[in-house]
Image (tube, grey):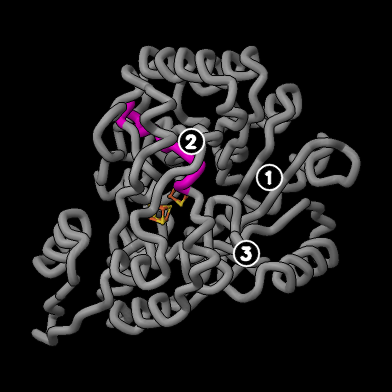
Amino acid sequence: MKTLNKLHHQLAESSAQLAILDDDAHLYSLVPFQQKLEQHNLFPLMATAVSIFQVNVGKMCNQVCKHCHVDAGPDRKEIMTRDTMQLCLKALAANPSLHTVDLTGGAPEMNPDFRWFVEEIKKLDRHVIVRCNLTIIRANKKYYDLPAFYKKHAIEVVSSLPFYTADRTDRQRGSGVFEDSIAALKMLNEVGYGHEGSGLTLNLVYNPAGAFLPPPQDALEKEYKQALMQHYGIHFNNLFAITNLPISRYMDYLLQSGNYEKYMEKLVNAFNPTAAANVMCRNTISIGWDGYLYDCDFNQMLDLKVAPASRHISEFNTAALNDREIVINQHCYGCTAGAGSSCGGAVV
Ligand code: SF4
Ligand code: SF4
């Protein structure tokens, strides 16, 4: 779709006034994110101190979710090699302040070196988060022991479950995903995940199924806990309510459904300066499957590499990264609307 390509190009290229010509040749514009930050004395947006090392180990996934910002799926071939993982380990070993390693994908478990990488990171005594899509645990016999593997290494598991009913979850993630997700959650509960006092953390992620912002996280968490316990006997720790960012497949959906303009207006009108001051990119560095560095996973998908100095894991320089200016664009409104949004849910 010609308009789509043009839009992605604009998002990636420019932080100036965004002007988009839609299918009906309707011209509209939005307040540039930079200008919004300037109005609140938040520009330039600077990193604080990097403590979270987020690694995208590949774009391959057993699912093809409608909202996926990675555009992941079974046919994606981009996979982090063991050599690049070695460079990540070297950077971690040299920088004890990187206390948390957040592994994402695709389905990170599909990288053939996933388990080796986790074991090597644990030798460096770091907290490890795995963004597990749940269905991978049930996808193939070779993954059935993942709950035991996670437990052995005290990994924090963060899993997307767009809603606590089958229809809404399957609409977003594919037919049968809810049933498999519930079965996988039960397997995680069986080894202790999600139970108070077990020390094994299982967090779930909600994201809206349409062009709207997430409801308040605390109230939604109570709703999820009640429904999942009552109907399936499922335990979990926290619910992260995440806003969909207008990029990749979700952007396609917004454009195709004619919701792009309305959605962006919602995000802009809900701009919250406190959320903007606490965006996750200030203490996170995101490493792509090929070792390039980004301010966050979203910038990674738009190929907006980190500002000059230390652009690749082979030249990892904490001092330069701690003092960098964050690369921003219109999609950043997704992180600053309402209670804000990050990989750990609401930020305020
Ligand atoms: S949202 Fe997650 S589970 Fe779904 S396709 Fe993307 S990476 Fe895979
Ligand atoms: S998308 Fe969010 S996390 Fe990424 S650079 Fe923008 S504000 Fe930061």
Which residue position holds label 1? 184
User: Which image quarter holds the C terminus?
Assistant: bottom right
In the image, residue 16 above or below residue 200: below
Q: Nearer the viewer, mark 1 or mark 2?
A: 2
In the rendering, at what x and y percent does residue 125 appear? 67, 18
Disc 1 from disc 3: Cα separation: 31 Å
Q: Does 120 lie within the magenta span?
A: no
In the rendering, at what x and y percent does residue 11 appear? 21, 60
Quick one: which residue is furthest to the front in this view? 41
Which residue position holds label 2? 54
Amino acid found under the numbered disc labelled 1: Ala
Q: Quadrant of residue 315?
A: top left
In the image, residue 279 above or below residue 337: above
Instruction: Please rate how many residues cluster around mark 1, counting C-alpha atoms within 10 Å: few if below 14, some from 14 to 19, many from 20.
Output: many
Relative placement, left or right, of 180 versus 5 is right
Q: Nearer the viewer, mark 3 or mark 2?
A: 3
- The answer to whether the residue labelled 1 contacts the one labelled 3, judged by CB atoms less than 8 Å apart, is no
Q: Residue at x 56, y 41 (%)?
A: 131
Badge 1 or badge 2: first in the primary sequence: 2
Disc 1 from disc 2: Cα separation: 24 Å
Relative placement, left or right, of 228 versus 56 is right
User: 94 or 293: which is nearer to us?
Assistant: 94
Amino acid found under the numbered disc labelled 2: Gln
Which residue position holds label 3? 348
- Please state the extent of the stretch shown in magenta in the rendering: 281-292
Q: Does 289 lie within the magenta span?
A: yes
Q: Residue at x 75, y 41 (%)?
A: 201
Secondary structure at numbered mark 1: helix
- The answer to whether the residue labelled 3 contacts the one labelled 2, judged by CB atoms less than 8 Å apart, is no
Secondary structure at numbered mark 2: strand
Badge 3 or badge 2: first in the primary sequence: 2
